[in-house]
Image: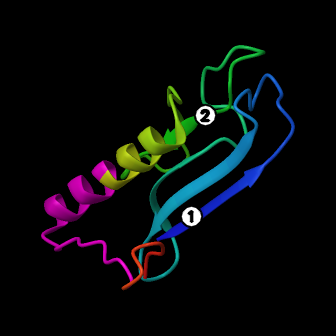
Amino acid sequence: MAVRVDWCDETPGRPQGISYGLVLNDELSERILGFDNSHQFDGASPGDPFDHEHRPGKTGQRFRYDFVSAPQLWDDFLDRVEQHCERAGVTFALEMKDDQDHFR
């Protein structure tokens, strides 16, 4: 799992002023699912925000994601990861370090 978040200038594509990518990769580092705003989604109109998701089994397709907030984005990502792991028969658990401020 990889998470990248950077501050950026506010633009029509990134109106919230952040550039982000949250990705679940397989053992070969191929994307299984993810959320990002690096480019437009399929069917986007000019001026639409870039927020979109990549869904399992839909390689090369990008689906609109309605960004609400960073905490909601994190929750939605973890929900999708958990759903995927459940379908794959894999246990998913997110562990916190002792200081509770960082994931491991």
**Residue at screen point 37% across, 43% down:** 76
Label 1 to label 2, Cα distance in Å?
Answer: 15 Å
Left or right? Give the position of 93 relative to 70: left
Q: In this figure, which residue is indicated by the disc labeled 2?
A: 51
Q: Quadrant of the C terminus?
A: bottom left
Check the image and report above or below for 15 versus 81: above
Mark toward the start of the polypeptide (1 vs 2): 1
Q: Secondary structure at mark 2?
A: loop
Region rendered in magenta? 79-97
Pick the residue in front: 33 or 96: 96
Q: Quadrant of residue 96?
A: bottom left
Circle 2 Cα neighbour tier, 10 Å, few/some/many (<14 / 14–19 / ≥20): many
Across and down, in percent, residue 33 comes to: 43, 55
**Residue at screen point 51% across, 61% down:** 23
Q: Is residue 55 magenta?
A: no
Q: In this figure, which residue is indicated by the disc labeled 1?
A: 3
Across and down, in percent, residue 71 comes to: 46, 44
